[in-house]
Structure formats: structure tokens, C-alpha cells
Amino acid sequence: MAVSFLAGEVSDLCLGKPSLRSLPATATVAAAVSALKKSGEVYLTVWGCEHTSPRSGAVHGGTCVCVGKVCMVDVICFLAKEENAARPSDALRSPVSELLPKAHGLVRHLEPHSSLLEAIDYILEGAQNLVIPIQSYTSSNSRKKLQKKPTSFGPTLHNGREFCWLTQEDVVRFLLNGISVFSPIPMLTVESLNIIDTDIMTVHYNAPASSMLASILRSHVEQTSVAVVDEDNRLIGEISPFTLACCDETVAAAIKTLSAGDLMAYIDCGGPPEDLVQLVKARLQEKNLNGMLELVEESSLSSLSSSSSSCSSDEEFGLGRHGGSGRYSPARRSEAIVCYPRSSLMAVMIQALAHRVNSVWVVEEDYSLIGNVTFTGMLKIFRSIAGRRTEGDNSFK
């Protein structure tokens, strides 16, 4: 029964999903920042309309293909790099392709009739998101009008079709809705299922935030977080790409000047405390990072005069619209979501979905950090069940 459940078409998971908003691969980083703020989206897709995909080298017959996605995390990490921190204005004029991770296969195209099992296989191979055409009955005339409609972040139509994301969260949520077909596996503990990943990224509370830049980039690609710990390896909080995605580009300055603990407070819900903002400015002056200081001051002036907000999309993070200025969302905090080795798989699934996180930290009773359980780890379990039952083995060993 598990096999037939996973044989369903991915189009069933796309019902009601909004069409993807996009940027051309030729856009600049500054254009991406502007489009993210104006669109209210966490992510914007990047499309290349060439005979060959610039990332994979695969031939697509001259059609438009999605070559990646960008969010504010990409911008923040890009500006925080040593070579860009001194001259952020120059970095903002770089092509948006500079923001795309170099890893292959993070974004994959999939047809609506493809099976859920195929989608899971792509995710386990490393795909962050699957791009799937939206099946609609829009007339050709209507499509032409939509294609020509000007926007600040590009068209939603490509090759005459609209597309949507299919995320790891979408797949896990769908599996939870039919969890009974996998019984009794969901009631087993994450420890007994051997899905606690101990290859995690940590940073000491008092360590410079700049020392974790590579870890932030890795956690962004792997859709996890960086654990902030004390000297006894007890979990204090986390630096999450999901939180950074709802900040603005000036967080790059905070990464260059603050400790990991202060950075947690800086990006926490509601926007940075004024004392930390002043501390960032003072340390930028000390480091002679005048270009970044100008960026922070310009952002402060802009936020005072603006009443609009971004980061309103719930497509991946469940972030709702909020009042005030800037991109800081009250829906995300630096507080880490935790479970225990004896927690059941089903309990951890529910916990992750309820908090809209892709991974849950596993701790001992004293909060000593053991590892984490990710959506990818969960999907490996369900995929292996389907594989065994296809071969006639109904056991799980």
C-alpha cells in the first residue's frame, strides 16, 4: 500500500500553489534585492533562456529553464565576503548568477505526471526544490496578456506555462496525511531508526559571527541551521537561513562585526535592537568599512520613511504579512526547535511541520546537543520502506 501511495502524481501536491515569480539570469544583485523587497517573496527564481543551462550544461532546445533561486540569505552572505565587504556598492552591481550556489542539481524540473517516488529520489539526490508546470485551463490569449504584463520581478510565464515549487516540506506534509500506510514505522523513535545526523554545524556563543559564514552558506544549501552552543556543547539557539531570509541586506554588516550570540539577537523577530545597531556602526568605523556603513545608514533612513514590508510569502516558510518597516518578520525566531532521541518519527514530523522548519535539533535532557533530524532523513526512511515492499519484504530492520 505504501508503494501505491508513493506512485501518485506530483501534480496532486501542486493544487492551489501560486506561480513562481522570476528574475532573468542577466539581472544584477541590486535588482534582486529590489525585487525581493517589492514582491514580498522569500525566494525569486532565476531563469535562463538559452540553448544551454548555464549550471548543468544540459540542452533544452532553446527554451527557458529555471537555473536557481535567490533570497536575502544569498545576498547577505555575498556582501559579507571579505572581497565584497569593503565595496558593497560594487558587489551589488554583480550579476545575480554570482549568488547561485555552485552545487549541481539543487533545482530540478519535473513534469506533473511524474510520481511522488521520483520526486523523493530527486530530493535525496540533493535537489532543494522541484520546478513543476502548473496545469491550468487558461486560454492562449490570456497567457499572452499575462506574459506581456510588466512587473519589477519578471514574468510568471515561461515557455507559455506557469510553474510552482515543490519543496521538501510539501512532500513530508503529504506523507503525514497518509501516515497510516507506513505503520508501524512512524511510531518508532528517531534513535532506533538511525536518522539522527551528527554531522552538524555549531558555533560558540561568543565566537565572531564572521567565522560561521561558510557554515551559514552550507546550512542554506542543505536547508538546516547552525547551532549556537555554550562551552559545554549545550544548545542555546540557532542561526537559521529561514530567519535570515526575512532580514535585509544590512545583516551582512552584523555578521562582519558581531558575535554569534549578538547576531542571534540582531536577527530575532521584530528587527535589531537599537544598541546593537549602534554597535555595528561603531565597529564598521573601526574596521574602515565605510561602504558597508553607508549601506546600513541608508537602510535606516529608508526604513523610517517606509511603511511597506516584505517577506510575506508563506510558500516555504509560512511567513505572514506584518506591519512596520523593513523585512524582519515576527514569525521567525532564533529559538531552536528540539526533540529527544526517544521522540517518535511521527512526533518529530508534526513538530517540524508545525514550526515550519526543515530540521529539528536532537538534545539530551540537559540540552547537550546530539545532532538533528532533517526532512531528508525522514524521506530516506519512507523511500527505503517503499523499496523493500516493492521487493516483497514487509519488514523493517
Image: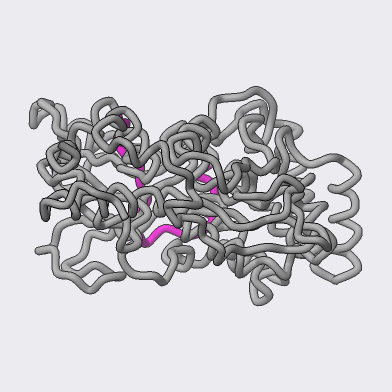
In the image, residue 250 lies at what x, y percent? 70, 52
Give above or below for 278 relative to 320: below
* The one of 115 and 257 positioned closer to us in this rendering: 115
Q: Is residue 54 magenta?
A: no
162 lies left or right of 208? left
Rendering coords of residue 209 (x, y %) = 75, 63
Q: Nearer the viewer, residue 91 or 321?
A: 321
Measured as percent of width and height from the top left, residue 387 is found at 19, 54
Residue most extreme to the bottom: 83
Look at the picture and state if 186 lies above or below 200: above
In the drawing, does residue 250 fall left or right of residue 72? Answer: right
Q: Is residue 32 visible?
A: no
Specify the segment rendered in magenta: 17-36
Q: Quadrant of the C terminus?
A: bottom left
Query: Which of the 4 quarters of the picture holds residue 391?
Result: bottom left
Instruction: Name the residue at 70% across, 53% down.
Output: 251
**Looking at the image, which residue is at 40% across and 43% down?**
153
- Could you tell me if residue 344 is visible in this image? yes
> In the figure, is residue 336 to the left or right of 159?
right
x, y (%) of residue 290? 80, 65
Please say if 245 is above or below 330.
Answer: below
Where, quadrant-wise, is the N terminus in this rendering? top left
Q: Nearer the viewer, residue 107 or 34?
A: 107
The colour scheme is one colour
Task: Kindly identify the residue that appears in the image at 37 percent across and 54 percent down.
Answer: 128
Position of residue 207 relative to residue 299, above or below, is: below
Q: How many marks do you count on the picture?
A: 0
| Occupied quadrant, residue 18 | top left
Q: Residue at x 30, y 42 (%)?
A: 166
